[in-house]
Image: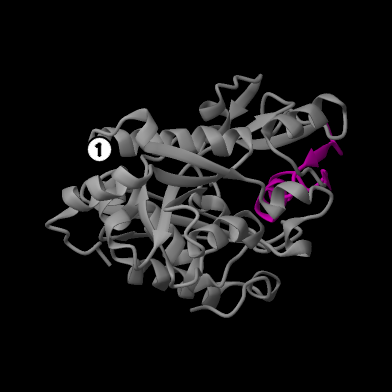
């Protein structure tokens, strides 16, 4: 739903700024802060605001505190959003900046993703080897992502999976310390942090990323008409269309952080190409579909999910929840 039209938005914004700055909530991790600064700068540029008129409010997410267990064991993706959600409801922040890959597909209707910044490189980077084929036989992949684990086991069933949690620096340090032989990180995160580790960006044609990977979303309260209008000016339309389709696909699939699923949409000559792959947990089975749909046709994206579930073998279908 588009934000309400505010004919007096300029006056309302001026009134707000006389009292306090616009407050953007973010996690405290280096990557989250880098992304929040990008969102703050986009908001300043869109409305001619000064540095002091947009401030960041940092907080530690539960997911940042719990590092020794997989997300599915301790609450899933809500671990990344819980504290920011509470701050929005309590009025301590006006909007929250998220890596959309980490945001639950089905959200409380009290919240709305009011804008997405232009998507960065959505690919995965392989660290520790120059290609999938060059990984030593029986090597250990460090990851906490069911998608990456299943994807790697599908390509390389000889490999072992070991739990890797933590921010980018932590996971790179674990790799350097020999806790795993290879790992996979999002190219977007490395680029935003200015990191350039020796690694290879995996071809998206053969190694499809997670839904929403590389996208930054800015969320606010559905009832906050002023913030919805202000944030809408920072939205990158093509990103919103593609990531919206990926999230609609995931919602219809009943997918969450437990589910090994890849999906990626691109605009192509006025249409949208949406590709998706579902895996069994051990990577032995996979199903891949693709569909060309009209941009903004989230119903067609959901239809792709239903079609894949209908064709999926039991080992894959059992990993997905009740579709919506």
Relative image position of residue 287 (x, y in whole percent): 57, 62
* Residue in the image at 14% along x and 55% along y: 8
* Residue in the image at 37% along x and 29% along y: 51
- 105 is higher (above) or lower (below) than 240: below
Camera-side residue of 163 and 127: 163
Quadrant where the N terminus sits is: bottom left
Q: Is residue 278 magenta?
A: no
Q: How is the image coloured?
A: one colour
Q: What secondary structure is found at the residue carrying circle 1?
A: helix
Residue furthest left as drawn? 7
Does any portion of residue 167 appear in the rendered image? yes
Q: Is residue 146 magenta?
A: yes
- 200 is higher (above) or lower (below) than 119: above
Does any portion of residue 207 appear in the rendered image? no
Relative image position of residue 290 (x, y in whole percent): 42, 58
Q: Which residues are magenta?
A: 136-162
Residue 166 is drawn in which quadrant? top right
Residue furthest front as drawn? 19
* Residue in the image at 28% along x and 34% along y: 49
Relative image position of residue 199 (x, y in whole percent): 64, 24
* Residue in the image at 67% along x and 37% along y: 184
Residue that label 1 marks: 46
């Amino acid at each position: 739903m588009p934000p309400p039209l505010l004919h007096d938005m300029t006056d309302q914004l001026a009134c707000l700024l006389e009292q306090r700055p616009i407050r953007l909530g973010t996690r405290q991790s280096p990557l989250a802060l880098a992304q929040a600064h990008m969102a703050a700068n986009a908001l300043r540029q869109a409305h001619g605001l000064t540095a002091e008129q947009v401030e960041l409010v940092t907080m530690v997410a539960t997911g940042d505190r719990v590092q020794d267990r997989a997300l599915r064991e301790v609450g899933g993706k809500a671990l990344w959003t819980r504290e920011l959600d509470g701050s929005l409801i309590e009025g301590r922040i006006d909007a929250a900046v998220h890596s959309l890959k980490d945001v639950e597909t089905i959200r409380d209707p009290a919240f709305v993703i009011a804008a997405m910044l232009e998507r960065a490189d959505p690919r995965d980077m392989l660290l520790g080897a120059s290609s999938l084929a060059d990984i030593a036989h029986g090597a250990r992949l460090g990851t906490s992502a069911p998608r990456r684990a299943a994807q790697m086991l599908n390509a390389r069933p000889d490999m072992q999976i070991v739990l890797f949690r933590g921010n980018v620096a932590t996971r790179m340090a674990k790799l350097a310390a020999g806790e795993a032989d290879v790992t996979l990180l999002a190219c977007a995160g490395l680029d935003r942090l200015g990191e350039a580790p020796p690694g290879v960006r995996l071809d998206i044609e053969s190694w499809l990323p997670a839904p929403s990977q590389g996208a930054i979303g800015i969320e606010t309260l559905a009832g906050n008409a002023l913030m919805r209008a202000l944030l809408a000016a920072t939205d990158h339309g093509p990103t919103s269309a593609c990531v919206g389709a990926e999230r609609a696909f995931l919602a219809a699939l009943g997918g969450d952080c437990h589910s090994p699923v890849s999906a990626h949409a691109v605009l192509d000559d006025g249409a949208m190409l949406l590709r998706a792959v579902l895996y069994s947990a051990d990577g032995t089975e996979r199903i891949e579909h693709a569909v060309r749909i009209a941009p903004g046709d989230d119903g067609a994206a959901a239809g792709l999910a239903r079609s894949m579930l209908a064709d999926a073998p039991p080992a894959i279908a059992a990993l997905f929840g009740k579709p919506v």
